Amino acid sequence: MRIGVIGCGTIASAAIHGIAQDGHQITVSERSSRNASMLADTYDNVRIADNQGVVDASDVIFLGLMAEVAQEILGALKFRDDQRLITFMAAATLEEADAMVRPARVVAIMMPFPGISKGGTPIMMQGDAALVHEIFGNRNSIFPLKDAHEIAAYLCAQAVLSPVAKMVNDAAEWLGERVSDKAKGEAFLRALVASNLSDTASADLIEALNTPGGYNQRLRIHMEASGMGDALVRGLNELE
């Protein structure tokens, strides 16, 4: 597949790392030149071009731009009517991005996480799920959503990742003061959280860890009494 990338920031670069060994011909824009140069130096099938060069060389194009500059940048380019685009822009809906690239079509919006570079990450998306699955589905889990309202809700809810990471980091700091190998302690906690939540529903895991008087139950009750759940809901409501 001939794939182009306009806007080669952190997330777009991670997406390219995740698919660069799948036999695609990939052209990345010279915007964010450091990331573009690193990708071109790492992979033989990645080359750099200006934005119009990316468009001319590609059948499927990823938009990794900031929404506030996208109209100006994309408006200066000449797209073909046979091209399909996937946008990574969180601040522009699928329909808004589509209007910027005619006669080409933006057929999907997706929100990758940095883990897409190695695979094993969830991808929330709206639109052409078959295309997203064809490109990213071999290594990642695709979560198709029905409309912009669902995308917006998922974007709010996914922000739980940072507080969870903060809690693990704080627990690792506490543990590190009490054990001989701080790094090993943090690695244990990361693996503990990731492995236990990967295949078990949250409610089921809470129940499984609800041994009366056990460490997990006692800490959860303490955190709930401290207002953790209410603070989370208030924060999510403020993001809407």
Image: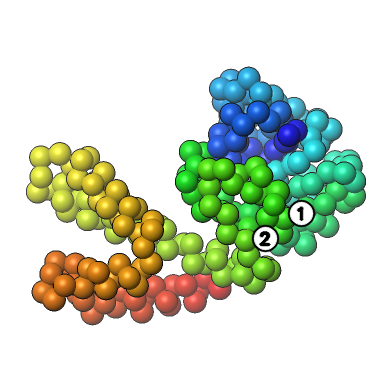
* Amino acid type indicated by mark 1: Val
Q: CA distance from mark 2 to mark 1?
A: 9 Å
Left or right: 224 as drawn, with respect to 126: left
The vertical placement of 228 against 131, above or below, is: below
Left or right: 230 as drawn, with respect to 50: left
Left or right: 96 as drawn, with respect to 43: right
Q: Residue at x 74, y 41 (%)?
A: 61
In which quadrant of the rendered image does the N terminus lie? Answer: top right
The vertical placement of 19 against 136, above or below, is: above
Residue 17 coordinates in the image, percent (x, y) = 56, 34
- Tag 2 residue: 126
* Amino acid type indicated by mark 2: Gln
The front one of 42 and 140 is 140
- Kindly tell me whether residue 112 is visible in this rendering: yes
Of the numbered discs 2 and 1, the one sitting upstream in the chain is 1
In which quadrant of the rendered image does the C terminus lie? Answer: bottom right
- Tag 1 residue: 107
Disc 1 element? strand
